[in-house]
């Protein structure tokens, strides 16, 4: 396992430090001896690289005026491009310039402030006059090292705190903690520290302890409070609306955990992995009794794409249902289905002979298999937000073969669930995104925040390119389209390729694992890249392996309280990053293909592939593992966290494992007892649903009865 910059002060999960004023022991960072050859091409401006070289020359000669002048010019003209801050890690140029300035000597900082303070002062006065957040954001993005940068960080942190964006508040306030003489003499540009704030540091540190507490990290908050009392026993200030001794105020607040109301992502599964952070835990374990109802999913043309998945199945468990109120929805390439999860009847109907198909309204469509060969695993996801369902429909092919004769387009559709009983509100076809005769494809289902939705775009020619685009959730109109990276095509041009990339949304920031050598963070407002990390990509070209759902997974990043976990499918590494900065917290090689990041609790990260693993989320150390070495007993579908347990599906049974301690609580036999098979698990109310390759099965709470006596919807109703 490799830890980079482990000695840097980060206010995250458990490596709490007060900059280096209160310092925990950290592992020695390991140095990368040589830079790997990156598999992606990024928008790095050569002019910036040359000008940065000039800045370093001026700094070595202590020509502060010239160094500052060039930095301001670089930031103003090239601020949105990327700069290689360290091997394998890129920052936005404007952010890197501010980080670099923070390490300048006071006389150089004074020169910079003389030039930018008038502009920063104007923005700050606009914010105080009621112009909202944007003037403060302008300061933090363009003039953070001005005399008003610390005030902007402080006010933005207060706004984030009031809005419940605790991780954002932490990242803003953390930047106000200055470095001390005990830090490394070489300033590290990977993380920003405002060097000379006149704000009361103990008061800021006390707020950071409250962030830990209200994030539910009670033991960590207690530890931090103990360290704070030792360092600042007499410090006074204002905290949570009260004036007084800060240690006493903290002790009073921390003594009452009942005042903490954690974000609720434990109710309905609204998207893949349940929540847009890709981290979901149901409040209560499901009650599994008899098979209550079963819905046979017709085989459609797109599910014939793959020729030889494992265990003789022609299709994988590639359906990922979502739940809204009393209904469950799922889709394949052609149709969106809606069922009442209590009865198994079509949504909004008591007639078992009515059609459960919500989209398309016309039940017939002429579809043909592609002319050229196809590799990859088709998977189907959707997202529910604001009473609407958003799904990616059409051909699952995302990288079209160069000489493919069939138009392989994809659609993004929006259905009204709350007001229109599944009525189509709008549809965007990838054919509309044509650019110089090269067509984009939508990847997986979008994530949604407010009135905006975000989705990954992909194309295979003239180069393999991955973008992230933002659309209006109300109309489907494009707002911005941001290029992330280019890559070499890993399979020959005459083959169609299926992928299904999903974004992760955490604290109003977007995260994307491209599965081709890069992981990126983007701003939801304007699409600007916050940071981008590259890693050694394993070039997978074996068609059978790429088409085997036991060899590949659907693994978007998982966000939890400021930490981003990633398991790229083109790498054998499992990684954890500080989500705000992109700094690597830890990474470790993995013995088998990770197919699911199932969830993260306060102390444990749950990962599955052939077997199920529980890791210490702070270090990546494996605490426990369970499963079989026999391929017939490997994991089969996506499990779920519920209560204190993880429900993990195999092909013929479900294992119920204690999430923190890893002991096996129960085995639920599917095939022998119910005649069912494993698949992707969904909790709806107190019922457990299993989406297997060809069937959606609901287990009720009644006594156990044979599966063949359970209620069923006739396949004849699907027309």
Image (tube, helix red, strand yellow):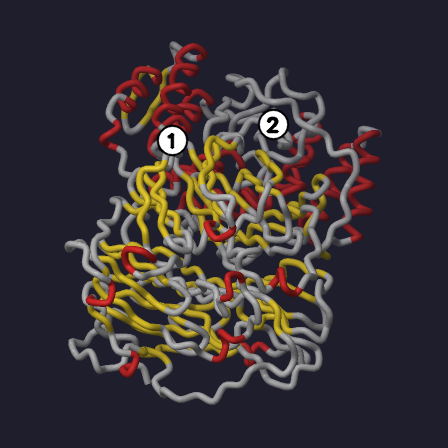
Q: Residue 274: name its quadrant.
A: bottom left
Q: Secondary structure at mark 2?
A: loop
Camera-side residue of 457 and 274: 274
Report the residue at 63% width, 16% height from top.
181
- Find the residue positioned furthest to the front: 672
Q: Nearer the viewer, residue 688 or 232?
A: 688
Secondary structure, mark 1, is loop
Q: Is residue 616 visible?
A: yes
Q: Which residue is mark 2?
A: 6
Looking at the image, which residue is at 70% across and 21% down? Answer: 185
x%, y% of residue 499? 57, 65
Rate crowding at label 1 as few (under 14), some (14 to 19) or many (20 or more) other CA atoms within 10 Å. Answer: some
Q: Position of residue 355 (x, y in %)?
A: 27, 81
Task: Count all numbered tags in the image, as a single digit.
Answer: 2
Q: Considering the image in quadrants, where does the C terminus appear?
A: bottom left
Q: Which mark is residue 326?
A: none
User: As displayed, is residue 129 above or below residue 192?
Assistant: below
Spot occupied by residue 312 in the image (x, y as percentages of width and height): 51, 66
Label 2: how many Cα within 10 Å (few below 14, some 14–19, many 20+): some
Residue designated by label 1? 661
> Going by the image, does 65 lie left or right of 502?
right
Image coordinates for residue 611, horizontal then vertical, percent: 48, 44
Q: Nearer the viewer, mark 1 or mark 2?
A: 1
In whole angstroms, how far apart are the C-alphas of marks 1 and 2? 27 Å
**Relative to 375, 296 lies left or right:** left
Q: Tell me if label 1 and label 2 are in contact, CB under 8 Å.
A: no
Q: Does the image show residue 480? A: no
């Amino acid at each position: 396992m490799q830890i980079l910059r482990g000695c840097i002060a980060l206010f995250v999960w458990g490596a709490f430090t007060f900059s280096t004023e209160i310092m925990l022991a950290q592992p020695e960072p390991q140095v990368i001896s040589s830079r790997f050859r990156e598999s992606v091409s990024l928008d790095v401006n050569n002019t910036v690289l040359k000008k940065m070289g000039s800045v370093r020359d001026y700094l070595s000669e202590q020509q502060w005026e010239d160094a500052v002048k060039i930095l301001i010019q670089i930031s103003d003209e090239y601020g949105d491009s990327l700069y290689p801050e360290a091997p394998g890690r890129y920052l936005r140029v404007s952010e890197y310039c501010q980080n670099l300035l923070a390490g300048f000597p006071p006389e150089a900082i004074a020169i910079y402030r003389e030039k930018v303070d008038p502009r920063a002062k104007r923005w700050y006065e606009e914010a105080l006059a009621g112009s909202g957040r944007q003037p403060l954001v302008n300061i933090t993005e363009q003039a953070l090292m001005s005399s008003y940068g610390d005030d902007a960080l402080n006010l933005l942190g207060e706004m984030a705190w009031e809005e419940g964006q605790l991780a954002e508040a932490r990242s803003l306030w953390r930047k106000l903690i200055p470095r001390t003489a005990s830090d490394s003499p070489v300033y590290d540009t990977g993380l920003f520290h405002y060097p000379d704030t006149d704000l009361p540091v103990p008061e800021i540190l006390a707020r950071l302890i409250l962030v830990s507490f209200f994030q539910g990290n009670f033991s960590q908050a207690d530890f931090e409070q103990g360290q704070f009392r030792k360092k600042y026993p007499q410090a006074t200030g204002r905290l949570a609306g009260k004036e007084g001794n800060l240690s006493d105020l903290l002790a009073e607040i921390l003594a009452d955990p009942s005042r903490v109301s954690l974000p609720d992502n434990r109710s309905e599964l609204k998207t893949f992995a349940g929540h847009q952070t890709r981290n979901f835990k149901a409040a209560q374990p499901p009650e599994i009794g008899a098979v209550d109802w079963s819905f046979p999913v017709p085989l459609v043309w797109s599910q014939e794409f793959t020729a030889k998945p494992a265990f003789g199945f022609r299709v994988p468990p590639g359906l990922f249902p979502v739940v809204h109120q009393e209904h469950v929805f799922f889709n394949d390439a052609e149709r969106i289905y809606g069922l009442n999860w209590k009865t198994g009847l079509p949504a909004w109907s008591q007639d078992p002979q009515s059609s459960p198909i919500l989209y398309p309204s016309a039940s017939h469509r002429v579809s043909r298999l592609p002319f050229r060969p196809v590799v990859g695993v088709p998977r189907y996801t959707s997202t529910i937000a604001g009473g609407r369902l958003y799904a990616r429909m059409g051909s699952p092919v995302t990288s079209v073969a160069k000489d493919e004769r069939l138009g392989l387009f994809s659609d993004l559709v929006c259905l009204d669930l709350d007001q229109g009983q599944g009525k189509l509100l709008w549809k965007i076809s990838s054919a509309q995104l044509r650019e110089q005769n090269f067509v984009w494809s939508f990847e997986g289902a979008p994530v949604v925040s407010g009135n905006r939705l975000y989705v990954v775009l992909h194309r295979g020619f003239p180069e393999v390119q991955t973008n992230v685009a933002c659309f209006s959730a109300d109309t489907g109109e494009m707002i911005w389209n941001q290029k992330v990276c280019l890559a070499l095509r890993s399979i020959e041009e005459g083959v169609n390729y299926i992928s299904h990339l999903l974004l992760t949304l955490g604290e109003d920031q977007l995260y994307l694992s491209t599965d081709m050598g890069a992981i990126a963070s983007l701003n939801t407002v304007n699409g600007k890249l916050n940071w981008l990390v590259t890693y050694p990509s394993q070039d997978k070209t074996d068609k059978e392996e790429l088409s085997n759902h036991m060899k590949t997974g659907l693994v978007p990043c998982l966000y939890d309280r400021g930490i981003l976990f990633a398991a790229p499918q083109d790498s054998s590494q499992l990684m954890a990053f500080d989500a705000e900065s992109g700094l690597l917290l830890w990474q470790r090689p993995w013995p088998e293909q990770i197919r699911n990041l199932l969830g993260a609790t306060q102390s444990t990260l749950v990962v599955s592939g052939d077997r199920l693993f529980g890791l210490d989320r702070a270090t990546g150390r494996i605490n426990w593992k369970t499963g079989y070495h026999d391929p017939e007993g490997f994991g089969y579908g996506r499990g779920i966290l519920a209560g204190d347990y993880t429900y993990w599906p195999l092909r013929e049974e479900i294992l119920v494992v204690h999430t923190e301690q890893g002991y096996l609580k129960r085995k639920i036999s599917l095939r022998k007892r119910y005649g069912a098979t494993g698949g992707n698990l969904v909790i709806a109310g107190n019922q457990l649903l299993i989406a297997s390759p060809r069937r959606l099965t609901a287990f009720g709470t009644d006594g156990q009865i044979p599966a063949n006596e359970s209620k069923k919807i006739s396949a004849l109703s699907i027309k």
